[in-house]
């Protein structure tokens, strides 16, 4: 749960700075690397650290994806009002 909190705090503002698409690509790469890395850990503490990193990537992806999916509806409704 701490990874979700930290990921939301880090990747939310990062999405606003560099954009949603680059952030989503970064998060997918991080999720894949850390997720695969959890299969090859030598001890439990390293496993917990990698799962923390995976949770950060999942939280950032969830925030980016929800915001991105809500955008087209807002743009569509605002463009219809102007016509």
Image (tube, helix red, strand yellow):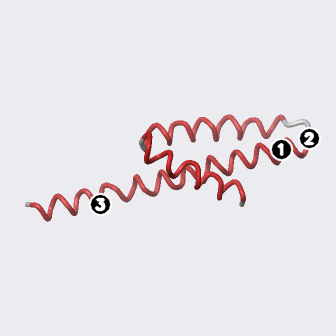
Q: Is residue 34 left or right of residue 12?
A: right
Tell which circle, 1 or 3, labels the residue nearer the N-terminal end.
1
Query: Circle 3 sits in a helix, a strand or a loop, which is it?
Result: helix
The answer to whether the residue labelled 1 contacts the one labelled 2, judged by CB atoms less than 8 Å apart, is yes
Residue marked by disc 2: 43
Mark drawn on residue 64: none
Residue marked by disc 3: 73
Residue marked by disc 1: 47
Total label count? 3
Kindly give the residue lying farthest to the left in the view shown.
Answer: 83
Q: Position of residue 9 (x, y in %)?
A: 58, 54
Tell which circle, 2 or 3, labels the residue nearer the N-terminal end.
2
State how far apart marks 2 and 3 are (Cα). 47 Å
Q: Position of residue 29 (x, y in %)?
A: 59, 35
The quarter holding residue 80 reads bottom left
Mark 1, other Cα within 10 Å: few <14 / some 14–19 / many ≥20: some
The answer to whether the residue labelled 1 contacts the one labelled 3, judged by CB atoms less than 8 Å apart, is no
Quadrant where the N terminus lies?
Answer: bottom right
The quarter holding residue 5 reads bottom right
């Amino acid at each position: 749960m701490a990874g979700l909190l930290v990921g939301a705090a880090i990747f939310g503002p990062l999405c606003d700075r560099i954009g949603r698409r680059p952030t989503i690509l970064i998060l997918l790469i991080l999720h894949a690397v850390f997720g695969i890395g959890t299969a090859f850990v030598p001890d439990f503490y390293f496993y917990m650290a990698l799962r923390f990193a995976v949770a950060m990537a999942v939280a950032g992806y969830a925030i980016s994806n929800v915001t991105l999916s809500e955008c087209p509806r807002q743009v569509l409704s605002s463009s219809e009002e102007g016509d």
